[in-house]
Amino acid sequence: MLDEKLIQNIIEITHKAGDKIMEIYERDFAIYEKSDESPLTEADLAAHNCIVDGLTSVSELPILSEESANIPWDERKQWSNYWLVDPLDGTKEFIKKNGEFTVNIALIKDGVPVFGVVYAPVLEQTYVGVAGKGAYKITSGVQAPITPSVRATGETWKIVGSRSHQSPEIKALLDSLDGETELVAMGSSLKLCLVAEGAAHLYPRLGPTSEWDTGAAQAVVEAAGGKVTIIEDSADALKADAAPLKYNQKDSVLNPYFLVSC
């Protein structure tokens, strides 16, 4: 089902969606409200429509997108394979114009993200992960394999996180690590990609996310050799037997807290 032609088609779809976003990014844009009160832009909807049109032209699989999320659980629970889409992750980064937003498309098979593309149009970076085949990053047209970086003994932990918002749970997790820690700031699903490419050791997420926020980037992380696991106790987040984050297992599309690691 997932051959090289389809992989290239999906990469091209993310790039076309990125082009739609950039048309709006480079001018002023209207901001609307969604039911969860997060900002919704013209770019969100333009990218969504572009992706849905693209996916339906190359695949008959159902699509779950942040911008068309009202599919009943009775219908969704029948899906074994489907596309999971976030047309513009990092809307706040988009509005701030800092470039750290992404287009995300994942293929989910039996609850597992087996293929994902994460594209950051301003940065001209594309992350691709294919289960069993590895992961790579395309920067301005140049492709290179990526892999997580195992922390050496005594090395400072590089943690993806916020300098200004440290919850007690995050503090407990940081305190459980041996050695010094350095915080690496990043927006959107690029946080997970930092671990996938070895630019950070850990990304603990102890706040709300939805499945479309993580599916594509989790595919990249896991194809690169990393892990995305559920956090049950922030003071013991690195336990070896932590369960992997899975998809379409329940009515709610909210994720539990999770840790991205190698």
Image (cartoon, rainbow, N blue to C red):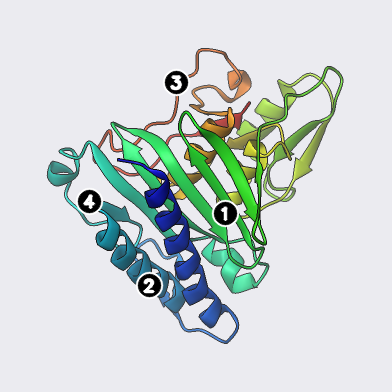
Which residue is at the front of the view, 132 or 39?
132
Circle 3 Cα neighbour tier, 10 Å, few/some/many (<14 / 14–19 / ≥20): some
Q: Secondary structure at mark 2?
A: helix
Pick whichever of labels 2 and 3 is earlier in the sequence.
2
Q: Secondary structure at mark 3?
A: loop
Q: Please give the residue where the numbered disc 4 appears in the rendered image.
A: 62
Q: Answer with the quarter of the image where residue 155 lies.
A: top right
Q: Secondary structure at mark 1?
A: loop
Q: Residue furthest left?
A: 74
Q: CA distance from mark 1 to mark 4?
A: 24 Å
Q: Amino acid at mark 2?
A: Leu
Q: CA distance from mark 1 to mark 2?
A: 17 Å
Q: Please give the residue where the numbered disc 2 appears in the rendered image.
A: 45
Residue 104 position in % (x across, y down): 46, 54
Is the residue under label 4 in contact with that under label 1 (CB below 8 Å)? no
For image coordinates 55% across by 57% down, the residue present is: 119
Q: Is residue 208 above or below residue 8?
A: above
Residue 168 position in % (x across, y down): 64, 34
For image coordinates 29% across by 38% down, the residue present is: 248
Q: Amino acid at mark 3?
A: Ala
Pick whichever of labels 1 and 4 is earlier in the sequence.
4
Determine whether, in the image, residue 103 is placed left or right of residue 108. Answer: right
Q: Please give the residue where the numbered disc 1 appears in the rendered image.
A: 188
Q: Please give the residue where the numbered disc 3 appears in the rendered image.
A: 243
Q: CA distance from mark 3 to mark 4?
A: 26 Å
Circle 4 Cα neighbour tier, 10 Å, few/some/many (<14 / 14–19 / ≥20): some
Q: Secondary structure at mark 4?
A: loop
Q: Amino acid at mark 4?
A: Pro
Q: Amino acid at mark 1?
A: Ser
Q: Is residue 89 above or below residue 244?
A: below
Pick whichever of labels 2 and 4 is earlier in the sequence.
2
